[in-house]
Image: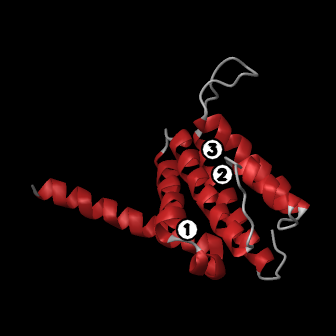
């Protein structure tokens, strides 16, 4: 029984450290507006998967879910309906078309959308098989996702930083 408690305590400590790191990466402004359960916790889960090795795909899927939830928040903040837009690329394109995201952020998001699709959509019709997602891609994806969220919040608040 004590081994189980020790494992739970270690896991809780790792989770708390990951949440702290995510909040640091996205910055105080973004941390203040991002839903913990829908954005911060999935990003932290992605970071934990990325740091453990052998789970690049899981890191991308978790961080991708966080971005999609964040984009839902952002569209509400801008008073914009993304209607039938499903997925990161479609939501970003809808926000771009309405003038709510500048080209630099749209282009940065394309990496996030396409890597997430590679991780989460099974067989790619263009190549006839699924993409393998490396540990390095998982790690990098989490950090790019955090910076994208930070940059969109900064843009929303009149600051321009990538």
How far apart, in angstroms, are the residues tagged by discs 1 and 2?
13 Å
The reply to whether dot 3 and dot 2 touch (C-beta < 8 Å) is yes
Between circles 3 and 1, the one closer to the viewer is 1
The residue that appears at 58% across and 72% down in the rendered structure is 34
Please name the residue shown 68% across and 25% down the image.
124
Quadrant where the image shows the C terminus: bottom right
Name the disc covering residue 140, or none: 2
Closer to the camera, 126 or 54?
Answer: 126
**128 vs 105: above or below:** above
Tell me where residue 100 sits by quadrant.
Answer: bottom right
Viewer-side residue, 32 vs 100: 100
The circle on residue 45 is none
* Residue drawn at x 53%, y 51% as measured from the top left: 62
Residue 127, x across and y down, in percent: 73, 20
Side of 11 where 124 appears, left or right: right
Please give the label number shown on residue 136.
3
For disc 1, the marked residue is: 22
Q: How many marks?
A: 3
Question: Helix or strand or loop: what does disc 2 sit on?
Answer: helix
Which of marks 1 and 3 precedes in the sequence?
1
Q: Secondary structure at mark 1?
A: helix
Residue 54 coordinates in the image, percent (x, y): 49, 38
Height in image: 115 above or below 74? above
Q: Is residue 108 visible?
A: no
Give the alpha-carbon distance from disc 3 to disc 1, as whole Å. 18 Å
**Category of crowding for the residue at label 2, using alpha-carbon neighbours closer than 10 angstroms: few (below 14), some (14–19), many (at least 20):** some
Q: Position of residue 119 (x, y in %)?
A: 61, 37
Quadrant in the rendering for residue 69:
bottom right
Circles 1 and 2: CB atoms closer than 8 Å: no
């Amino acid at each position: 029984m004590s081994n189980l408690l020790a494992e739970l305590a270690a896991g809780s400590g790792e989770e708390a450290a990951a949440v702290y790191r995510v909040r640091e990466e996205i910055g105080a402004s973004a941390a203040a507006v991002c839903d913990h359960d829908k954005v911060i916790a999935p990003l932290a889960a992605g970071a934990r998967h990325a740091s453990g090795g052998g789970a690049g795909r899981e890191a991308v899927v978790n961080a991708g879910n966080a971005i999609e939830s964040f984009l839902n928040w952002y569209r509400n903040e801008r008073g914009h309906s993304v209607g039938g837009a499903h997925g990161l690329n479609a939501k970003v394109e809808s926000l771009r078309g309405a003038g709510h995201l500048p080209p630099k952020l749209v282009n940065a998001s394309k990496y996030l959308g396409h890597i997430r699709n590679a991780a989460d959509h099974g067989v790619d019709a263009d190549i006839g098989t699924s993409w393998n997602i490396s540990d390095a891609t998982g790690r990098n994806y989490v950090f790019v996702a955090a910076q994208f969220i930070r940059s969109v919040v900064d843009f929303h608040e009149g600051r321009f930083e990538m």
